[in-house]
């Protein structure tokens, strides 16, 4: 009985979906002009450090640097009198579709300029059971000490040369890196159907 | 007044002891592994994460609309600022114009929140130093008034969810502004009273003067921000340095103490900041225009354009920033919090080196760290 009643209700309910505009899942990347080097990109180039300009991060100059040249670049930007980017705001890790990025936001204590540096490790280059490797700057810049530990913990980037690269927010024996897109929880606490589970 | 900082010289075996995780003065759950030589701290290792709630993971697994309600928990003493940081970052990426009245309401609530956060710090810091009776409850009387204001406009005393992407949630009535105005008239007198009790108190001076000196160089190397940095003599306030919202139109001082950067200076910096916040609130009450308060529709399908960006606000503890990568869907692709307490806490080990045990809480408390903000 109940099966027969149900279909009768349905057709009247939803005439709406046809009118509803479907938002595009991923907007097509508009063909922007290829980004050119900004002030700091040019400064680094004069110094002999290769960098690739990237699309602006909401108006802020963004450059990509090869992992090997990162320490030299940061040292130059922090110490040289014309750059003076002496405030490392944050070190973040991003699990992008094709690469794993280590992102450095640089500010200055004396002027309002900003710079975003990205070090990108292509996923194709990372061996199956290894973590992507980026040189550490923690011994040179103390801010990066805990920030690199956090990025290692959550995103899984191995900072080569960090003298105490240990998990900082998760327990020390945690497995996996939670902010990777392919991370699976060992036990899904919300949908756990196993009656034997301790949760 | 001379202060005895020289300690008797004798050598004992080093001892490792735990401070915390459950310690009444750590304002949350923090464990410090201390290596001691007698009474003197030789090495400190903070162990974080007892309050880790995976805020960044939750950010990329929840819709924008759902996550807005969660982020007040990042720093529960200044929820307005976490909401504001998220909203600013999303608005910068999305290109949303915020109505002028909403901007003024944001500044008003944020400055009230800054005062309430500093008041809780003032009360608990005196408890940390051993002033258990009487005084700590005086700041809480004023804090209670501010929390009542927030309850009236947002329905919540601590988790406001008031500042939203595109504006603010509710428009307060005219009576509410009158109450705030009366509060601003009364408040400076209260600050005078507290200062009369605390600032020149000999016991307080003994516990704080010349202790925990944070030099400019160390503060900059560790990325310390907020009143803690300004007490070390660096004029770095985001409201003045990279003005956002309507701060360029407001007149206020940024108190900087170019003295020693010791514990007492950090206390003084916060007291002065409260007075400046009251000045800002008075101006906002005069200047606030009529009009709309929300420019983006608040519903479950809230979306932000594709792009990435970093935006920060000056919270009571320092620079609270938010680095967002959005791919245009209803969920953020990546959320990264830059929390002031996290960087400010990292400077604790060098500050505690060679200090006696009794100074640990005097120094730790003066950094004004809130552990949920560290652990997220």
Image: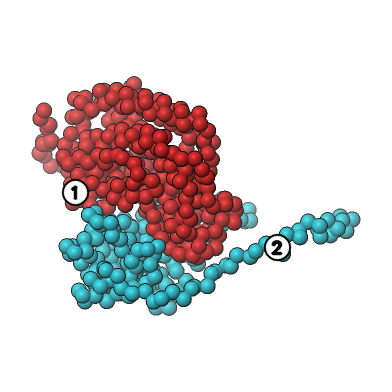
Q: Quadrant of residue B29?
A: top left
Q: Reply above or below: A101 against B217.
A: below
Residue furthest to the right in view is A1
| Residue indicated by mark 1 | B216
Which quadrant: the N terminus of chain A? bottom right
Q: Reply above or below: B139 against B30.
A: above
Residue A175 visible in the current orientation: no
SS at badge 2: loop
Circles 1, 2 touching at the beta carbon (< 8 Å): no
Chain at numbered mark 1 = B
Residue furthest to the bottom in view is A124
Q: Nearer the viewer, mark 1 or mark 2?
A: 2
Q: Residues within 10 Å of mark 1 (few under 14, many from 20)?
A: some
- Residue nearest the viewer, comparing B179 with A130: B179
- Residue nearest the viewer, comparing B330 with A99: B330
Q: Quadrant of residue A26?
A: bottom right
Identify the residue shown where x is 53% and y is 39%: B171
- Residue nearest the viewer, comparing B205 with B170: B170
Q: Reply above or below: B116 against A30.
A: above
Chain ID for red = B
Q: Is A192 left or right of A153, judged from the image as shown?
A: right
| Residue indicated by mark 2 | A19
Identify the residue shown where x is 10% and y is 36%: B6
Q: Position of residue A38 (x, y in %)?
A: 30, 70
Chain ID for cyan = A
């Amino acid at each position: 009985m109940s099966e027969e009643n149900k279909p009768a209700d349905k057709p009247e309910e939803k005439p709406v979906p046809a009118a509803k505009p479907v938002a595009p899942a991923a907007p097509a990347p508009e063909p922007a002009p290829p980004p050119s080097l900004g002030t700091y990109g040019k400064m680094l180039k004069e110094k002999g450090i290769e960098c690739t300009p990237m699309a602006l991060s909401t108006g802020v100059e963004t450059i990509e640097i090869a992992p090997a040249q990162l320490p030299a670049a940061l040292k130059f930007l922090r110490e040289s009198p014309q750059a003076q980017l002496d405030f490392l705001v944050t070190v973040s890790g991003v699990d992008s579709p094709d690469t794993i990025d280590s992102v450095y936001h640089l500010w200055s204590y004396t002027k309002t300029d900003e710079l975003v540096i990205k070090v990108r490790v292509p996923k194709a280059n990372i061996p199956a059971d290894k973590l992507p490797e980026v040189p550490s700057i923690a011994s040179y810049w103390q801010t990066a000490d805990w920030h690199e530990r956090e990025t290692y913990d959550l995103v899984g980037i191995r900072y080569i040369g960090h003298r105490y690269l240990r998990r900082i927010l998760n327990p020390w024996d945690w497995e996996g890196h939670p902010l990777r897109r392919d991370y699976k929880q060992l036990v899904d606490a919300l949908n756990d159907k196993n009656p034997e589970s301790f949760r | 007044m001379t202060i005895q900082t020289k300690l008797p010289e004798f050598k004992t075996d080093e001892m490792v002891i735990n401070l915390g995780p459950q310690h009444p003065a750590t304002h949350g759950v923090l464990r410090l592994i201390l290596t001691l030589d007698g009474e003197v701290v030789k090495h400190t290792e903070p162990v974080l994460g007892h309050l880790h709630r995976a805020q960044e993971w939750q950010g990329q697994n929840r819709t924008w609309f759902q996550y807005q309600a969660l982020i007040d928990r990042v720093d529960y003493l200044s929820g307005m600022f976490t909401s504001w940081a998220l909203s600013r970052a999303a608005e910068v990426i999305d290109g949303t114009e915020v109505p002028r009245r909403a901007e003024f309401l944001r500044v008003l609530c944020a400055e009230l929140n800054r005062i309430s956060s500093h008041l809780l710090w003032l009360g608990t810091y005196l408890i940390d130093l051993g002033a258990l009776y009487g005084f700590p409850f005086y700041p809480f009387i004023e804090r209670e008034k501010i929390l009542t204001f927030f309850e009236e406009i947002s329905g919540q005393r601590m988790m406001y969810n008031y500042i939203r992407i595109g504006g603010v949630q509710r428009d307060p009535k005219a009576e509410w502004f009158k109450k705030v105005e009366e509060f601003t008239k009364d408040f400076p007198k209260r600050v005078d009273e507290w200062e009369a009790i605390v600032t020149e108190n000999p016991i307080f001076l003994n516990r704080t003067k010349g202790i925990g000196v944070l030099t400019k160089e160390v503060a900059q190397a560790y990325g310390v921000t907020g009143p803690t940095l300004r007490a070390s003599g660096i004029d770095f306030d985001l409201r003045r340095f990279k003005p956002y919202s309507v701060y360029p139109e407001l007149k206020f001082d940024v108190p900087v103490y170019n003295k020693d950067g010791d514990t007492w200076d950090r206390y003084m910096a916060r007291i002065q900041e409260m007075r400046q916040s009251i000045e800002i609130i008075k101006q906002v009450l005069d200047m606030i225009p009529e009009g709309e308060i929300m420019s983006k529709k608040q519903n479950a399908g809230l979306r932000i354009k594709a792009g990435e960006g970093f935006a920060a606000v000056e919270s009571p503890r320092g620079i609270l920033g938010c680095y967002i990568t959005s791919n245009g869907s209803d969920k953020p692709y990546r959320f990264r919090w830059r929390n002031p307490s996290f960087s400010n806490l990292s400077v604790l080990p060098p500050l505690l080196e060679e200090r006696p045990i009794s100074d640990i809480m005097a120094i730790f408390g003066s950094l004004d760290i809130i552990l949920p903000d560290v652990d997220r």
